[in-house]
Image (cartoon, rainbow, N blue to C red):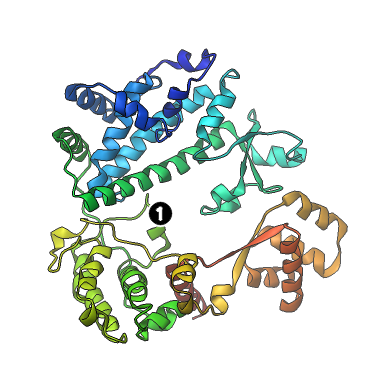
Amino acid sequence: MAKFAENEWTQKMLLSPEERILINPLDLLYKELLEKAAYKDEEILSEVEKRLDGTIDLYNPPEKEVLYQLFPLVSVARKGSHSREARLVVEMISSQVQERLTYALDNPDIEMDVLNSMRPIVTAEVLSKELVDIPREDVFRLIPQHDRLRYLVPWSYLSDYDLTQYYITRGWVPLTKEQLITVYTLLLSKTLREYIDQKKEEYAFHQMKLPPLFGNILKQLSSRVPAVSVQAVGATELEESAFPPCVREALHGPSSGLRNYAITVLLTSFISYARVYPSSTAFDPEKKPELSPEQVDILLEEVVPFIIEAGNRCDPPLFTDQPIERLNIYYHLGFGLNDSPRHTDFGSTTWYLPPSCKKIKQNAPSLCKPDTLCLEGVYAVADRDKLETLIDMNAGDPLKVLLAVKRSRNPQKIEEISGVNEVEVKRILRNLEKEGIVFQIRVKNPLVYYIRKIRRRKRDR
């Protein structure tokens, strides 16, 4: 793997506004740079080929780099962010940015400019005692020898990831340089995938036809992606008794005001994933596999009839009243606007994930009737400093619960470890939450509810 222009970053005295796209490819300036850009197709194809071969260019003029970054993203838009080509492009761009940050953050003359360039993706501050004061023993525990904590990131940026691997204090996550780069790359990749899907919908809506160059770039990318068959992942029979309350409400046949959302948006996505891919990895774009022919069969032959039947229970029947909604069912399942889809049509549009609990509550509040599992959460530590202080100050049952909180996030497990009764554990956890020492993570998606309930049943057998 060749690298160029390390000195360009380590000796730079200033980062120009245009150079921000070398750190954040989707900086607002990219549109202006694209409008001014001049290029030849051969030049773009040659550069993409070079990067596919593993060459990392640490520095390119912004007016050139914007082409090398954006054109491959646009080329894979029609395939969507879950395609193997899209994953290849996102990885290719992220690795370039990751390598640049390795050098740029070590240059004090441009460090603040670099952090500012990162802000649209993640807000990172230079670590200071004014913001947090981390005990020396925790510092030694948190980082490898010969490394040091340098930055702070608000914990909210990592709320969708496993917070247990991070140290949280006063709402901040302290990070080394390498850890910050890892977090930034993770969030940048997510942003790039969202951009791909945004462009996919935009092109489909406007029926846009792209110039031949983009088709040629896509061919380059496809030639580097192994044509592997992905095995079916955990397709299982539906367990209706494990459905969340909102799904059960939707199955009862809602009236005209709720029909479209309940059937087309909620049920279609939930039933398809619950039947074909009941796994929390559905929410992880890096792990989500493409469907096997058997799984596509299930979507067409079992899931679609299930949804049609549910729609016919509505008042008035949804698909009799609005036949076009049948097309929307196929669209949300990933088959495009096609009334007689074939296996090969799968992937024409995004296979939509179930909407979050928050979106269901916003769009169809009468479907949201939370039960105990909906309201039950796990507890993550938000301020370890305060937790340690309380441990030093307490004794008896409170101390037992506080020590258990350090070992487990699950309320039932905290009861088991501490040996303290349920009522007292709940009281202490409520007080800790009120003081901002812990925060509760509840079920945020009906599919997560379903998966969690099934797992719990298996454990109890």
- The amino acid type of the residue labelled 1 equals Asp
Q: Is residue 92 above or below residue 276?
A: above
Is 225 on the left-hand or right-hand side of 255? left
Front residue (pair 110, 133)? 110
Residue 170, x across and y down, in percent: 71, 48
Q: Quadrant of the N terminus?
A: top left
Is 374 on the left-hand or right-hand side of 315? right
Q: Residue sitting at 77 percent across and 75 percent down?
A: 424
Front residue (pair 301, 144)? 301
User: How many C-alpha atoms fall within 10 Å of the one at disc 1: few (<14), some, or many (≥20)?
Assistant: few
Q: Is residue 195 above or below residue 180?
A: below
Residue 344, x across and y down, in percent: 14, 58
Q: Residue sitting at 30 percent across and 23 percent down?
A: 36
Is 353 on the left-hand or right-hand side of 441? left
Q: Is residue 339 visible in the rendered structure shown here?
A: yes
Q: Which residue is labeled 1 in the image? A: 284
Q: Is residue 83 visible in the rendered structure shown here?
A: no
Q: Residue sitting at 18 percent across and 39 percent down?
A: 210
Residue 252, x across and y down, in percent: 37, 86
